[in-house]
């Protein structure tokens, strides 16, 4: 399955916005210009722009065009509304990423794993424990579960680089949406060992169930974040009330 074109355009425009090629409050090129520039349909351009708008990067103005409203934050922040890899997050914030694989295993989901992840009992899974560093500081401990029927031939080497890059560019999986829950939990022995929590006895936890274009949940991930460096940002849109 070829990579979805609108995602390529979305990512290119997003990069141009983040790097300042399009300045804050500047109007992006017109739809017609983008259609010619990217060699695509109007619907494809509009879908890419809609994705940027949903993440708070741009705002459409009737009769005027699409304005860049993105302003980088002083502290590195993850996006609630979007799905981005750790390396994409680090690049967006101008920081150096490193991933260390602490555990790589294959297992079968039992009742305990099913209760935790949502995968059916008997599912064949990869379980990966990864420690993410930014600028040499360990900040995020990830517990990843991937469905082997979908995420085939996963290796430790791939896990040390970018699993999503492998999924999208090698397996051609279309990642559609991720349902997330954010909580604060007491630290575990593993958290204390790897995250240098100091005087903290708790940390921020983000649990995600992620689905592909076939509606199959192929990933469950629990990300455990150091409190000193935990910041999520989102773009909230008020919906009009029906009368």
Image (tube, helix red, strand yellow):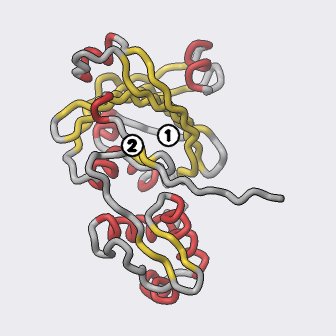
Residue sticking out furthest to the left: 136
Vertical order, 73 against 101 (above or below): below
Q: Are marks 1 and 2 in contact (CB under 8 Å)?
A: yes
Instruction: Between residue 23 and residue 89, name the one nearer to us.
Output: 23
Q: Give the label on residue 151, or none.
A: 1
Residue for point 29% across, 43% down:
161
Residue for point 17% across, 41% down:
135
Tag 2 or tag 1, which sits nearer the N-term?
Answer: 1
Residue sticking out furthest to the right: 243
Q: Give the label on residue 194, or none.
A: none
| Picture mark count | 2
Instruction: Between residue 81 and residue 162, name the one nearer to us.
Output: 81
Q: Secondary structure at mark 2?
A: helix
Find disc 2 in the rendering and name its residue. 163
List x then y, in percent, for residue 20.
28, 70
Dot 2 crowding, Cα within 10 Å, few <14, some 14–19, many 20+: some
Vertical order, 8 against 112 (above or below): below
List x then y, in percent, for residue 140.
32, 31
Dot 1 crowding, Cα within 10 Å, few <14, some 14–19, many 20+: some
Would residue 86 be visible to someone looking at this image?
yes
Q: Quadrant of residue 169?
A: bottom left
Q: Quadrant of the N terminus?
A: bottom right
Would residue 2 be visible to someone looking at this image?
no
Residue sticking out furthest to the top: 189
Residue for point 43% across, 84% down:
29
Q: Secondary structure at mark 1?
A: loop
Residue for point 41% across, 37% down:
154
List x then y, in percent, for residue 42.
58, 81
């Amino acid at each position: 399955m070829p990579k979805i074109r609108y995602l390529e355009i979305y990512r290119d425009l997003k990069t141009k916005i983040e790097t300042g090629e399009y300045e804050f409050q500047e109007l992006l090129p017109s739809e017609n210009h983008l259609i010619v520039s990217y060699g695509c349909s109007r619907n494809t351009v509009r879908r890419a722009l809609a994705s940027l708008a949903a993440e708070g990067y741009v705002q459409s103005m009737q009769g005027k065009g699409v304005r860049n409203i993105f302003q980088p934050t002083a502290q590195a922040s993850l996006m609630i509304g979007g799905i981005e890899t750790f390396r994409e997050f680090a690049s967006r914030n101008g920081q150096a990423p490193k991933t260390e694989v602490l555990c790589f295993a294959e297992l079968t989901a039992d009742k305990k794993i099913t209760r935790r992840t949502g995968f059916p009992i008997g599912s064949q899974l990869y379980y990966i424990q990864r420690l993410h560093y930014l600028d040499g500081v360990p900040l995020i401990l990830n517990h990843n579960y991937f469905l082997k029927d979908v995420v085939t031939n996963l290796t430790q080497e791939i896990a040390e680089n970018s699993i999503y890059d492998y999924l999208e560019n090698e397996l051609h999986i279309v990642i559609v949406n991720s349902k997330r829950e954010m909580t604060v939990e007491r630290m575990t022995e593993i958290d204390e060992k790897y995250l240098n929590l100091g005087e903290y006895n708790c940390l921020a936890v983000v649990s995600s169930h992620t689905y592909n274009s076939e509606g199959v949940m192929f990933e469950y991930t629990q990300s455990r974040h150091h409190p000193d460096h935990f910041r999520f940002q989102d773009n909230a849109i008020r919906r009009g009330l029906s009368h």
